Amino acid sequence: MDYSALLAAGAHAFSLWPLLSLLAGVSLGLVVGSIPGLNDTITLAVLVPITFALPSNIAFPLLVGVYCSACFGGAFPAILLKIPGTASSVLTAVDGHAMTRQGRAGQALGIATYSSTFAGTLSALVLIFFAPILAQYALRFGPAEYFALCILGLSTVVGMGAGNAMKSALACLLGLLVAMIGMSPESGYPRFTSGNFWLYEGLPLTPILIGLFGLSVVFEMLSSERSNARDKGADEVPVRFADMLLPWSMVRRLLPTWLNASALGNLVGVLPGAGMLVAIYMAYERVRRKFGERCGQGLPEGIAAPEAANNSVVASSMVPLLSLGIPGNSTSALFLGALLIQGLRPGPSLFTDTPDIAYLIVICFLIANLAMFPLGLLLARIIPNMIRSVPRALLAAAIACLCFTGAFAIGNSVFGIMVAVAFGIIGFMFNRLQVPLSPFILALVLAPVIERAFFQSMSLSGGSVAYFVTQPLSAAMLLFTLIFMVWPLGKLIIRRRRQVPG
Amino acid sequence: MTQRRLFALSGHWLDRGLSLVCLALGAGVLMIAKGYPTSAGALPMILGWLLMGCGIGLWLFPGKRADMRNVRIGGLLWGMAVFVAVLWLFASLGADVALFVLFVGCAVLSGYPPGLRLVATALLFVILVGAIFGGLLGVPLPGPVFALFSA
Amino acid sequence: MSVIPLRIAVVLLAGLSSGALHAADYPQKNIDYIVPFAPGGAVDFTGRLIAEAAPEVFDGHGFVVKNMPGGGAVIGQTHVSRAPADGYTLLAMTSSVINNALTKPVSYDLDSFTPLALFNLDPGVIVTATDGELEDLQAFLDAASSDSVSIATPGDSTSHHVTALALAEEEGLNFRYVHNTSAALQLHQLMGGHVQAGFMSLGEAIGPVEDGSIRILALLDGARNDLAPEAPTYQEVTGHEFQWGTFRGIAAPAGLADDVKEELEARLGELLTSPDFVERMGEAGYRVDYRDGDAFSELLEGTAEQMLRVLPLLETAS
């Protein structure tokens, strides 16, 4: 650890142009994240070539700013409209929107801002000081460990349905089933495609999310009674700064949740491939375990956990890239491109060969997360009141337009829109039939990883299923899964037994 | 409680309907996946059986909270019609025309009074979307008017 | 309301008049550069480098990079094969055009495209972890013929999987394939010691090789490469010839008018060999090997023949 280089980079980051471009990046990220269909990947893909012309001390603050804040930006529409702006805020929508409906939108946005800033800053510090250790730990995850981790992640959906376990199981199964569409990972055999090439790589995730969350809301608005359609959003109270600033008691109450979620985010998020969603769901599951029924009814911890988890994943997903030269997701693959363009090579040599830029990047993660706080609060003050001033009918129209545009932009084709419309109807039915959406999303994302990891393990072990249990790490995770699954059942039985004699 | 149970569009009868859909879906998956090679068909087969199981479970223990009342079927169908028309416009004429139609259609369907005011709002909004996507973010959208932004 | 149709009509008319092409008229507007993959990969990245340099060479008209992922690049390739051959729709052409045309029921083949320029050749490599137990290529071959070796590929029926299949067939080797979805995951498994070796492109391996976390056992090319001068070619070690690589080029739909084709080839040649572009590509880790349309066609034909030979292997393997 080269402290003098770290300090020099820190001082440099606070000079005029780097700081300005960082702030510009954070603002752009917030906007992009809050529009369903736009995300950090597509923004960075556009920005990276532009950064040629820029010196690296301006280029990287800009890119880091976008990357850090996009996933926080997704929380705004999630809380206010129940439409997650990015996949990472799927769970934020559950308690966040419940709070909005209770007239506590300001507090919900405040919690999201505090949680994101706290966890983001913490994981930036982890990135600065512990990146090499985390990277070595991530390398221990082979196929068997990935399989076990995803099964563990999937087990968190068991209790997720509001009351009816059968329906969360159903949502989970349907998610797995939709994920089956496309070429199988082992043999490339096309499944459920009926020869249609659009389906060969499976249904694209972003249009599905846009449909399930965005267009389903539009359908809901179109099919609700017209009588109050011209009213302004009546159930929303104006948001003031005072609502967003959390009292010390609330901060103390949320602190354990933040620490828990950040720890999970840092440990799980560092794994290339499946990290983000698993970390978020596991963090939420811990809250659900603690608060039970109150979860999903507008519980502050229900926002704090997913928001803290997703922001800590952002920085920790950079660990494999900076320490090993392996991009963990498509966004950090674009970062890799940006580094290469500037003549830098990610990997262990980055910090020894070009410490000024390497430390500037990690310091930027720290500052970007801190900058999110005032900018986030500012947006939280403006956006809700803006949404309130728009008549409901126009809001429906605007959401529909954004959904269509986003679904189109992701693949430059109307196929994305078709998928979004189809899943809009499915999402509408899910909502009406009280089938929870979150297990569906998790299963959809994890299914390909699970199937691939399974066949990889079979190939490595020569077809023996015992392989999963002989690897210590995967055995431990599978054991945890078993405990998690059996525990609620056991508790139920114990309770029944006690009730019978009494 | 009794009213909920009796009404066909709410409570556990809806869930029973869902369970039938589940059974049908599971059976369909099993039929299709049977023809797949082992490595590709294994997981779909498992899913098919689990879906059938889930369908039976849901039939036996239906919830009571599903609710299809207060749904204006007319609004839903009109909405679908607008969406399909917009899809066609998107592919044939361009994003700008399609988004304009979509905006006006959705607003009118949710009860906004049609008129010059709506047309002006829709125009402004569509141009704003085109400017943000095409100009600011560099994600080009097709269409005669939007082409001006990316040029 | 009347404002919109009028504007549309004006723009449409403008579009129509430019449709009637003379070479001198080209280029009149922005050119769509179709990348049949999602943002973030090498093809997308190099495409955006080209787009960045385009306006200088194309009289101020730009390349608009459009990602059309799906179907294993089939969606984007189909789109270009059906696009009007007016020089305003170009495809980021990779070997997947050949694979798809041979292995999937697609509506196009090599003849549906006019190859215009090749700008990057990326030879295949066999790699292992630096601390792995396979010392060199000979040890790798011995282990694979007596027992079996676990191999990380970037996916079933990808070019690298096919390479491994072809090698196994030629030398009588036993591989256990671990299919991934990207080179990044391959590297992860190699460095973590979960697999013994992997097949990938030199361009994807070079970073970790320079860091010392993986080693190149053999370069599947005719001669050593100056990116990794210590890495021996396969032929040097074994005496058998075995070459395989991927390439990146640019193509238009078939049926391009001759004058437009000449114009495009000349301008692309100028762009792809300009010192600025070569330098940027070099910084990003890609060596520019420019070849004109005819040479590119030849390379495509050669690759197609090679693919046809190993195709039966793929079918028996899956």
Image (cartoon, helix red, strand yellow):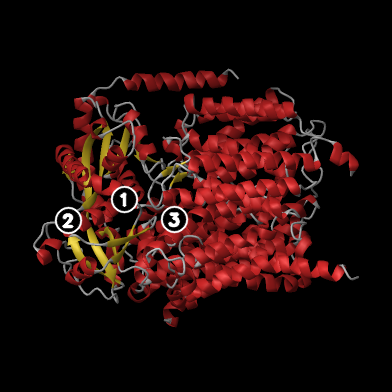
For the residue labelled by badge 1, is the local secondary structure a helix, a strand or a loop?
A: loop
Residue lying at 54% horizontally and 45% vertically, measured from the top left: A178
Q: How many marks do you count on the picture?
A: 3
* Cα–Cα gap, marks 1 and 2: 18 Å
Q: Which residue corresponds to mark 3?
A: A330
Q: Residue A302's quadrant in the figure? A: bottom right
Horizontal side, residue C187 vs residue A220: left or right: left
For the residue labelled by badge 3, is the local secondary structure a helix, a strand or a loop?
A: helix
Q: Horizontal and vertical percent for residue A31?
A: 58, 50
Horizontal side, residue A208 vs residue B71: left or right: left
For the residue labelled by badge 2, is the local secondary structure a helix, a strand or a loop?
A: helix
Horizontal side, residue C198 vs residue B64: left or right: left
Under mark 1, the amino acid is Thr
Decide which of A354, C189 is in the foreground and name it: C189
Horizontal side, residue C178 vs residue B15: left or right: left
Q: Which residue corresponds to mark 2?
A: C170
Q: Which mark is residue C158?
A: 1
State which quarter of the image contains the N terminus of chain A: bottom left
